[in-house]
Amino acid sequence: MRLGGPIYDWNGDCDAWIAAAKKKNYRAVYSPIGYRPGQTISDREIAACEEAARKADLVIAEVGAWSNPMDPDPAKAREALEKCQGSLALADQIGARCCVNIVGSRNPAQWDGPHADNFSRETFDRVVAITREIVDAVKPRRTFYCLETMPWIFPSNPDEYLALIQAIDRPAVAGHLDPVNMVNCPERAYDTGSLIRQSFAKLGPLIKSCHAKDIVLRENLTLHLDECRPGTGVLDYPAFLSEAAKLERDLPIMLEHLPREEYAAAADHLRQVAREARLEFA
């Protein structure tokens, strides 16, 4: 496993980027370059990032393609599709382990929000068609397109995830595990270990990158689940890291969605859990 997180304020300086990652003792990083619609990213800039990471023995975990190719507005959906394709091509060029996005949402007001039709068979079939269109246009050779788990959108559990990957039926489509995003009810909140073990058992080597955060079940009605810093919620990190350690050595465990000042404490917690479980980050 390789622990990583965001490096902020990218300004094109690869040396500063690598120095920041080393200062945080990260062994994996998010791509500092994202797809820029209408803008050309030079091959030199991309190659410089890849080479800098290689020399520093850092894994570039992900290129984010955050957008809604399921948007009810056809123009917005097309724009999102192009972003997904461009981001996947960038991930392949820069040597990232994966390009990751959610499947999108039928919600016209919120790109990643809940909607009554998000779990329909029609939506499932549209996700399959859209994902095929993304990967078939790019034909990546070194990376994978991954769909992140979500609480109110496919895939919201490991069975849905496996069914989706099998239906898409493309070798360039793999898995991305964010256990917190699947904790959408009290039963799962009180037994995250089972959810985590099921996810690794069913997806296993398909998993190319993981997100690390935590979740807390609040006491106010009717039901409130909130993200929080690793170590301050209910996620079973001993189970998470133990299962992840059974996979390949370079599997990234990427911190996310925290205030900048909390990343150090989050990283310390994961390293402490690993030590107590007699596990090692690469």
Image: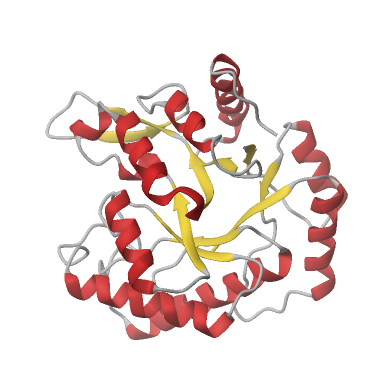
Q: Quadrant of the C terminus?
A: top right
Is residue 79 at least partly visible in the picture? no
In the displayed structure, would residue 108 be above or below residue 150?
Answer: below
Which residue is farthest top?
A: 276
Q: Quadrant of residue 99?
A: bottom right
Q: Quadrant of residue 7?
A: top right
Image check: 17 left or right of 192? right
Residue 112 in percent (x, y) is at: 34, 59
Which residue is farthest left?
A: 222
Between residues 161 and 100, which one lies in front from this camera angle? 161
Q: Residue at x 36, y 67 (%)?
A: 166
Q: Quadrant of residue 44?
A: bottom right
Between residues 172 and 15, which one lies in front from this camera angle? 172
Image check: 169 left or right of 268? left
In the displayed structure, would residue 167 be above or below residue 195?
Answer: below
Residue 111 in percent (x, y) is at: 35, 64
Image check: 172 left or right of 26? left
Between residues 23 and 197, which one lies in front from this camera angle? 197
Q: Residue at x 71, y 70 (%)?
A: 93
